[in-house]
Amino acid sequence: MSFPDFIRAFPALDLPFPADVVETHAIRSDRGLVVFFRFHQDFDLPPHSHKAQWGTLIAGEIELTIGGETRRYRPGEAWDIPEGVEHGARIKAGSCAIDVFEEPDRYPLKS
């Protein structure tokens, strides 16, 4: 699955993960950050926390642990992570997700 050209034209994020592992396209406002993620390889996201986050899976499969509870997500399913709750994930190659972060500066845009 690939996002349409107009979404792929949005700026990428400057992430601490290689571009051959995860591709990003983002829209930022003064109130939050919307990120379109595409994972090219299996990926383990270590446990961490930050302000609130909401997301939905478009394609693939994600095993997400939120506040110590693990659940497998499939396309069309959504997650809601409250501020400060620790979470981490195992993401399968080919997965595509949209995540909305309460923090507009959660990740910097690539210049």
Image (tube, helix red, strand yellow):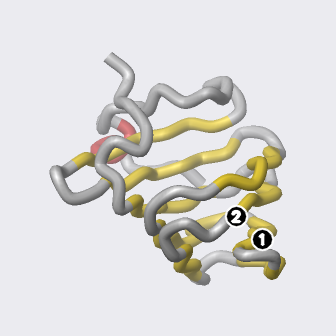
**Residue 111: x, y in percent?**
32, 16
Q: Which of marks 1 and 2 is nearer the N terminus?
A: 1
**Residue 39: x, y in percent?**
67, 45
Looking at the image, is 53 positioned above or below residue 36?
A: below
Looking at the image, is 20 positioned above or below residue 9?
A: above
Amino acid type of disc 2? His
Would you name the residue on which mark 1 appears?
A: 65
Calculate the distance from the C-alpha at mark 1 to the C-alpha at mark 2: 5 Å
Looking at the image, is 36 positioned above or below residue 57?
A: above
Amino acid type of disc 1? Thr
Q: Do the residues labelled 1 and 2 touch (CB within 8 Å)?
A: yes
Outermost residue toward the top?
A: 111
Identify the residue shown where x is 38% and y is 50%: 4
Q: Nearer the viewer, residue 67 or 11?
A: 67
**Residue 71: x, y in percent?**
80, 80
Disc 1 packing (10 Å; few <14; some 14–19; many ≥20): some
Disc 2 packing (10 Å; few <14; some 14–19; many ≥20): many
Outermost residue toward the front?
A: 84
| Quarter of the image where the N terminus is located | bottom right
Would you name the residue on which mark 2 appears?
A: 87
In the image, is 5 to the left or to the right of 54? left
Mark 2 secondary-structure assignment:
strand
